[in-house]
């Protein structure tokens, strides 16, 4: 069997008055002695006039924007005169001064960038392209032609009948060498300026 106990609330404040009954009617006809017209007139006369918020219009249709946040008004341009604004125990002495840790970090980044640039330049210098002189190009061309003549002479000395696998393999190898030499000779004859990579 459940035992229902009455809940108790600890209130430090006194109880509020009860809600009026539905049959109760509010008191009507109470009038105040205050003259609101004169009071409002006195407040307006004695009060400080409000300044309109500065704005700027950028279009002919009348689009308005705040002037202070637009960047059109010079702001914080007298940084050197801050001692005049805060003469004693100036809390803004370091106004506009870059913090030490940011300067240190910028120096580290700059140093790392310089080291990286030097490393890249060194690698580029090592792997730089060298231009062949006309004498070297001509000597290379003559050497390739001489090699082609030797391979061609050896190819011509092959037997007419290719009746074994070694002979067939030898013929294919000589044909491939001649084809590669002809390609290299054509490239060098076609290009007057040739660069080679340093190793």
Image (spheres, rainbow, N blue to C red):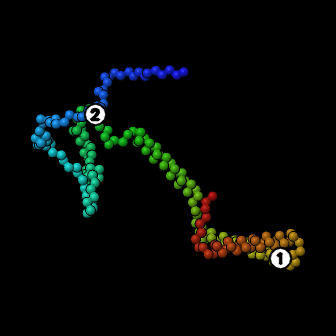
Q: Give the percent coordinates (x, y) of residue 17.
A: 29, 27
Residue beneath disc 2: 23
- Left or right of 87? Residue 142 is right
Q: Is mark 1 on a helix, strand or loop?
A: loop
Q: Quadrant of residue 25?
A: top left
Name the one closer to the observer, 57 or 42: 42
**One can see residue 43 in this view:** no
Instruction: Tell me if I can see residue 143 in this picture.
Output: yes
Looking at the picture, tell me which residue is in the foreground, 167 or 53: 53
Secondary structure of the residue carrying tag 2 is: loop
Locate the N terminus and report the quarter of the image it occupies.
top right
Q: Residue 2 at what x, y percent from top left?
A: 52, 22
Q: Give the Cα distance between marks 2 and 1.
A: 135 Å
Q: Which of marks 2 and 1 is in front?
A: 2
Q: Which residue is drawn at 23% across and 34% down?
A: 26
Snapshot quadrant of residue 172: bottom right
> Residue 142, percent across and down?
68, 73
The answer to which of 72 and 27 lies nearer the viewer is 27
């Amino acid at each position: 069997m459940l035992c229902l106990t009455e809940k108790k609330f600890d209130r430090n404040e006194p109880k509020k008055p009860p809600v009026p009954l539905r049959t109760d009617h509010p008191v009507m006809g109470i009038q105040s002695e205050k003259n609101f017209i004169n009071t409002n007139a006195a407040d307006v006369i004695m009060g400080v006039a409000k300044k309109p918020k500065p704005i700027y219009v950028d279009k002919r249709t009348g689009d308005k924007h705040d002037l202070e946040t637009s960047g059109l008004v010079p702001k914080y341009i007298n940084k050197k005169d801050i001692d005049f604004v805060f003469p004693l125990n100036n809390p803004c002495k370091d106004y506009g001064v870059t913090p030490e840790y940011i300067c240190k970090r910028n120096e580290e980044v700059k140093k790392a960038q310089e080291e990286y640039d030097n490393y890249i330049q060194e690698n580029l210098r090592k792997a730089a392209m060298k231009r062949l002189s006309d004498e070297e190009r001509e000597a290379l061309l003559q050497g390739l032609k001489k090699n082609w003549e030797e391979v061609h002479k050896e190819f011509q000395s092959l037997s007419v009948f290719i009746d074994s696998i070694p002979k067939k393999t030898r013929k294919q190898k000589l044909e491939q060498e001649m084809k590669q030499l002809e390609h290299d000779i054509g490239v060098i004859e076609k290009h007057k300026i040739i660069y080679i990579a340093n190793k």
